[in-house]
Each structure stands twice: as structure tokens, then as C-alpha cells.
Amino acid sequence: MKTWKELLAESIVDYDVLRTRLANLPDLDKKPIKFLVNPYVLSLMDHDDPNCPIRKQFIPMDDEYEESPHEISDELGEESCRIPGTNVIHRYPNRVLFLVSPICGAYCRHCTRKHAVFCKSFKIDREEILRGVEYIKNNKDVQDVLISGGDPLMLDDDDLEFIFKSIRLARPDLQILRVGSRMPVVMPYRLTEELGKLFYKYQITHLNIQVNHPKEITDTFRTHIREFIRNSACLIGNQTVLIRGVNDSVQIMRELCMKLASCSIRPYYVYTMDPAKGNYKWQVSYDRTMEIIEGLRGWISGVAVPTFVVDGIGGLGKMPIQPNYVVKAGNTLMCRNFENKTRIMSFLLSEK
Ligand SMILES: *Cc1c(COP(=O)(O)O)cnc(C)c1O
């Protein structure tokens, strides 16, 4: 059995090589940049179907260079919240994002940080990490550190241990220490027993992953997640990105959310597509998004229903989008259920 690193070393970064492995790949006019398909991700792809939801997420297309006037680089406004000299992004009152790696185990075409990720090789700069830790140490309002990237689980265990340990030592009172990673989905073998124990040792409270389509929930994924939950005692959440042509239907979202819950994974957020450069063709309309949201609540188990968010354009942060189930008109308050049956609930209008 090969290790996750050996498998990653076999990743395909050349479009002509990819053509020898998959049928029906279109000709590209431009030379694709920043693409990497590892052998596990390749194994999830349909050999023939260009509309395969896994292919769409990882294989570059000519039109991804076409931009729309609505798109902007760093659309989340992260740069304005970056603490100088560090990779700490402080947007919300009690928590920070700590970007520790600019590389990933596969590159999503819909990436929101595509302006910042991708390089051939990478070594963490421990001095820079320590500057970030120093900021966290001196800001006691920070009660939650979210380690992300790129993908932090591309780092070796000893680098991760250095990061976890530095943060825990600097702030023994820190309540939440969490990791965001797509590695469990694009390379489940990264979830080794040692990594689980490392998470346990430093009390990583949450691991948030990104599953976008039911096809990503394989037997390999399931078994590695299950073992990892046992070894790490960590809660696993999922952050899906709503992608046109990949998962923008009620039926796919229901299946995805229920399958996640069946793996003890909590569907946490569904993000609408960020208007990063080249992303316009992935965007799902507001009406369709609402139809999907309303197709979940009440129809599938409550533990499988995620919150849909628009991540703050111009750095406003995440904003929930939610259909209205309550209508108030004067002294009448109507509530509607998932089947559109309504009922007067005016007793909720006052406390006397
Ligand atoms: C998403 C995000 C967080 C974490 O937000 P939660 O809603 O607590 O999961 C923190 N900082 C930044 C900059 C983020 O984008």
C-alpha cells in the first residue's frame, strides 16, 4: 500500500498526460495553469463523461479564463484583514483564520483563493508561523483559531505539530482550535492513525472538509473518516460549495447531505459561488439557490440540513441566506411549513 505522499507524487500536472488517462477531453487553446490531478481523484472521475461532477471540479477548461465584470480578485477582502507580517486573517471578533500552507492535494477550478494558492514545493517558515502565534497570544479576544490554507494537511505531521503546539502553549485558554482541509476528500489516505492521534493530543476540536458531490463519498472515504473520528475525537463538519452543473439540484443536495450525516459528518455550510476571477460560469442563481434550500428543510433529517451562506463580498464576512417561513401582517403572524401549509401563530406576537 502506497502512502499518501507517494500517491501525491504520482499526480498528473500535464494535460497531454491526462489525455492518456481519460477519454473525451476537449482540446485547450491555452496552456492550462495551476492544475493537478492526483491518482485518487483520477479514480473518482468517469473515464468517458465530460460532464462527470468530479471532472468538472478539477479539470481545467478554456473558458475558465473568461472573466465577467462582476468578478474580483481577493473578493473576500481577506487582504484588508491580514495582520501585517503574518498569515493571520482577523475578520470576526472572537476568531481568526490562520493560513499555513499555499498548496493543495488537488486544485479546485472554483477555488476562492486561486489568486493565492499553488506553488511547486513549499516549506513552512517557522518564524512567520511564530509571528502569527504571537498575535494570537496577545489578543485574548481570540477564542477560536481556524487553521487553513491552501491545505494545512499537505504539511508533514511534524510541521503540524509545531503549529498546534505553539498555539496551544501560547494560549492554554483557547476554546476552539480547528482545521479546514479538503485532503480527507481528495486524498483520504492522509487521515492516518498518527494524524488522528496528533489531533487528539492537541485537542483539535473540529475538522471542516469540503465534499461537493455524493460521488466523493466512497468506501475509502467512509472508512478513513470513521477511523479518524475514533482516533482524534474530533467533530467533522462539511462545507459544500454550490456549483452550477455539479450539485445545483435539490435531489443531489438531499443525497449529499444525508450521505454526509450517515458518515457522522455534520453538513455545516453551503457557500454560494464566490465571484473570484473565472468563476462566473459556476454561479447558481438566487432563485435556484432558494429552491434548493427549501428542498432540504423538512424534507431530510434536521441533522443533515446545512446553513447556506454568501461569503462577504468586500470582506463583510459570511451572510446567511434563508427563505422566510414567517409572515407578519399587523396583528397576524403566519408560519408556513416545508409543504407550504400555513397557520396563524399570533400567540407569538406578545408576552402578556
Ligand atoms: C469563515 C471564516 C471564519 C470562520 O467562520 P465561522 O462562521 O465561525 O465558521 C473565520 N474567519 C474568516 C476570515 C472566515 O472567512
Image: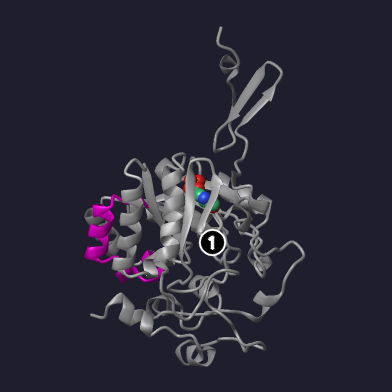
Please check the rendered image and state whether residue 55 is part of the magenta-colored stretch, yes or no.
no
Q: How many marks?
A: 1
Which quadrant holds the C terminus? Answer: top right
Horizontal side of residue 317 vs 95, given as left or right:
right
**Callout 1, which amino acid?**
Asn
93 w.r.t. 79: above or below: above
118 w.r.t. 221: above or below: below
Residue at the far top: name it.
352
Give 147 or 58, whichever is nearer the viewer: 147
Horizontal side of residue 54 vs 164, given as left or right:
right
The residue that appears at 31% across and 44% down in the rendered structure is 172
Residue 349 location, x and y as percent? 60, 16
Q: Which residue is under mark 1?
A: 247
Q: Identify the magenta region.
A: 183-206
Quarter of the image for residue 323 reads top right
Residue 162 location, x and y as percent? 32, 61
Give 189 or 347, whichever is nearer the viewer: 189
Residue 63 visible somewhere in the drawing:
yes
Please check the rendered image and state whether residue 187 is part of the magenta-colored stretch, yes or no.
yes
Residue 43 location, x and y as percent? 39, 78
297 w.r.t. 270: above or below: above
Determine whether the residue tagged by mark 1 lies in a helix, strand or loop: loop
Quarter of the image for residue 75 reads bottom right
